[in-house]
Image (spheres, rainbow, N blue to C red):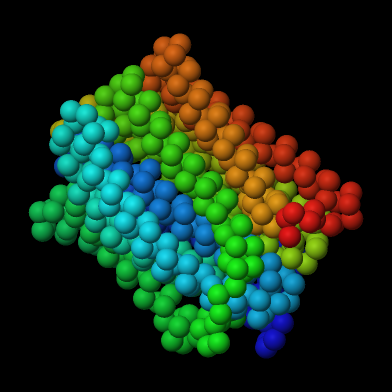
Amino acid sequence: MTGPMKAGVATLLGDPKPAIRSLAWPVMIGMLLQTVYNLTDAFWVVGLGADALAAVGFFFPFFFAVFGFANGMGGVGVGGSAISRHIGMRDHEGANRVAAHTAVLVLVFSVLITIAGLLVTGSFGTILGGETSVAAMATGYADITFMGTFFILFLAIGSALLRGEGDAKRTMYVMLVSSLVNIILDPIFIYGLGLGVEGAAWATVVAFITACIPIFWWIFVKRDTHVQITFAGFSFSRPITGGEILKVGIPASFQHVSMALTTFALNLIILMVATTDGVAIYVTGWRVITIGITPPLIAISTAVVSVCGGAAYGAGLIRKAEEGHLYAIRLGLLISLIVTVAVYLGAPPYIAQVFSYSEDAAHLYPGLVSFLQTVCFFFPAISFGIFSASLLQGGFGRGGMDSLVITLIRTIVMMVVSCYLLAVTFGWGGIMGIWWGGLVIGNTVGAGIGFVWARIYTKMLIRRGGSVPEESV
């Protein structure tokens, strides 16, 4: 490794327990702020009525797919795995080459996703059938959001580059800026300018653009990052693109996309046993849940990818990766139990009321309470699944294929199939069959499978003396 070792890099290469805490807490705060602005979106959209909530909720899986692809390519393919792995191997120039190739891929994928997204939005009316009002609002919201694809990708991958070298604090500052801009612009665009649902989309896109400015400044102008992006003498390398970035990033992206497809499939299943009110309850309730459970657990999972699946793997320290994985689970389980109790007790008097305050959305209140007090029972299981998938991402888990398989088992098999069988085929409980069948039982069983898979694979590597199978390199 050339040049002085920055503090973030030293942390990344040290004891996994403080390294995980050090990388996780800034991301946790940043994600909490992002979740607050997501809830702010929902809060202001509630005032437009249940149809507006359903429209935003219908598009949410598509947005999550784009955002998930960005985070899969960035958080795992670039920052969490490839760059951290090169840092673990003390290969500074290799990390620089990965970063430069990623910048080129951002441009390519931005164009492809934008074109594909704008083509898909034209079918919303057909998918939603007679819900013409919901379809029109969902299409307007989606078209604006897809036009901001480049900024979504750039922000995710730029932030991942910083996290990959152990500099998580600056990503927190970026998320703070993005969140504040969105929170301020939401009421102005939605009500002040009279843009309605489309105003929420514009506020989101402007917030992403604003957050990209400091990332661009640090990486391309000030150039004070450990990993440097330079195009001097750049030549496209298939081994770097295919063997390091895409081999790891594509499976990780498909994990996020599979979760988005799962949400879309659940929306369709909900429409088979209920109305668009069911979709509004599901999406609104899920947004409420994310403020408590998503920021801490996703933050810890990104740290596990960088510390365990990236740096520890790159240095050949499998027992260090195991130690970090089990520590993350214990930490996440404690957080999950606290959030479970808080959501169950707080749903009736406070939480559901906030998101059904308008006259048009007041009838959603009982459904929101029921949803929140049901799905919170799978929270304690989340850590076992999500951190196991994080450990197996990147080179540690054969190019991320192990992580992809256990995610597909959890989302497609355990969640979607069980929801359809319980709620539609057997007609058990209607929409409650979806809440219990897919979200609680499916997530819990899927998390257990992922944990067992990760433990078996890790023990196998330890028995081999810390060596990783050739197909994962």
Could you say which quadrant of the image residue 184 lies in? bottom left
Q: Is residue 386 left or right of residue 49?
A: right
Which quarter of the rendered picture does the C terminus lie within?
A: bottom right
Q: Could you tell me how many numbered marks the image carries? A: 0
Q: Position of residue 264 (x, y in %)?
A: 38, 36
Q: Position of residue 448 (x, y in %)?
A: 66, 34
Which residue occupies the foreground of this view, 305 or 338? 305
Q: Position of residue 170 (x, y in %)?
A: 49, 72
Which quarter of the rendered picture does the N terminus lie within?
A: bottom right
Please name the residue shown 67% across and 88% down the image.
3
Please name the residue shown 19% across and 31% down the image.
131
- Seen in the picture, residue 210 relative to 139 is either above or below; the reply is below
Please name the residue shown 41% across and 69% down the image.
107
Q: Is residue 302 left or right of residue 295?
A: right
Which residue occupies the foreground of this view, 27 or 208? 208
Q: Is residue 142 left or right of residue 17?
A: left
